[in-house]
Image (cartoon, rainbow, N blue to C red):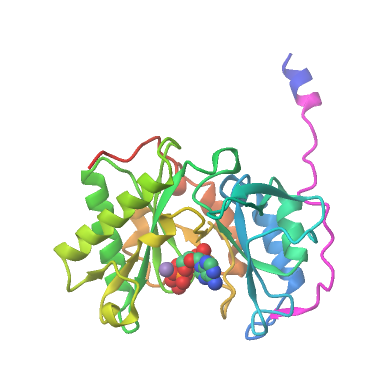
Amino acid sequence: AEAVVAEKAAPTPPASTIKISSRERVIFPEDGITKGALGDYYTAMAGVMLPWLAHRPISLVRCPQGRAKQCFFQKHDAGSFGEQVHHVDIREKDGGTEPYLYVENADGMLACVQMGTIEFHGWGSRVEDVEKPDRLVFDLDPDEGLDFDDVKRAAEHIKSVLADMGLTSFPMLSGGKGVHVVVPLSPRAEWPAVKSFADRFARALAADQPERFTATMSKAKRKGRIFIDWLRNQRGSTAVLPYVVRARPGAPVAAPVAWSEFKALDTAARWTLKDAGELIERAGSRLLQGWGVADQVLPEV
Ligand code: ATP
Ligand code: MN
Ligand code: MN
């Protein structure tokens, strides 16, 4: 019987059949990184990214002429992505619906890259049940001048307040300036309840430590503080997804990390597009085993 299993093992299907054109086009002028290199990164990373990216309404940061030229945030299906990129009709406030983009596999991801996508951002819910979030994100946005140690301490504080409520959370370096604290949820509560929790949580932190935190978006209120961007948790908002390349100099990557290694990190842009091998190895390592996964619901508070 063992022999049969071995013989029948299916060959690994090609990760993607999408052909990336203009492979030599430089997309990151500061670093000489080409569209081909970006395509190779996403092809290599598809296996570790798809659990987070697939079956979720997404918005794309597209920069067809590279990150230094015009980029735009695209939410809706313009009909130009081809059959690998799907759409899900989502009800709008005005009662109509709009077709939001989603992908199912590496071909879908790479079709987006072929269309000039650098960044993938996702809703906090999946296409099967868009009204019920499966994660909450506290996006920590430090005022200019704060150092990364302050951001790290803030993230650890949030982790412990969440833990006191019985909630497990996971850190992700944004690839930019900050950290996202991700709280996986079993999709039971709907958006209004989740948004209300995030709002109250952020305001309670800011009330408790006003010298350190603000829950208000205004730059003036941010002076020397960290904005807890709880607004990521309303219906229609997105957050950058794990392992996405940021359209910033150096092509930094949004990187899941473990709380156990968190203190030793000294920048939110620790890994870049050039680190695909290391990122894949990390994703499969014990350190990140179970990252972003927890069967939990928000407490009634
Ligand atoms: P950083 O650590 O530098 O703050 P970030 O990804 O958290 O990186 P933010 O500016 O805090 O960047 O944005 C948070 C999220 O808001 C983004 O990840 C994205 O999903 C969403 N967002 C950003 N720009 C736009 C935009 N132009 N339109 C809609 N949503 C956006
Ligand atoms: Mn942020
Ligand atoms: Mn933000």
Q: Nearer the viewer, residue 287 or 84?
A: 84
Residue drawn at x 23%, y 51% is: 160
Residue occupying the far top of the picture: 1
The answer to whether residue 124 is above or below residue 222 is above
Left or right of residue 145: residue 41: right
In the shown orientation, is residue 39 left or right of residue 219?
Answer: right
- Residue 253 horizontal/vertical position (percent): 54, 66
Which is more toward the observer, 100 or 257? 100
* Residue pictured at 25% horizontal, 80% vertical: 224
Q: In which quarter of the view is residue 226 placed? A: bottom left
Check the picture and name the quadrant holding the N terminus.
Answer: top right
Does residue 268 appear in this view? no
Answer whether residue 26 is magenta in the image.
yes
Identified at 56% across, 55% down, the residue is 94
Type of secondary structure dominating the magenta stretch = loop
Q: Nearer the viewer, residue 249 or 260?
A: 249
Is the residue 65 above or below the residue 116 in the image? below
The residue positioned 54% from the left and 46% from the top of the image is 284
- Where does the magenta region start and end? 6-27
Q: Residue furthest left?
A: 208
Q: Which x, y percent locates residue 27?
A: 70, 78
**Dividing the picture into quarters, in which one does residue 116 lie?**
bottom right
- Quadrant of image for the C terminus: top left
Please state the horizontal and vertical placement of residue 37, each as a whole percent of the image. 72, 69
Identify the image quadrant of residue 212: bottom left
Asked whether the viewer can see residue 264, the reply is yes
Query: Is 124 in front, or is 119?
Result: 124
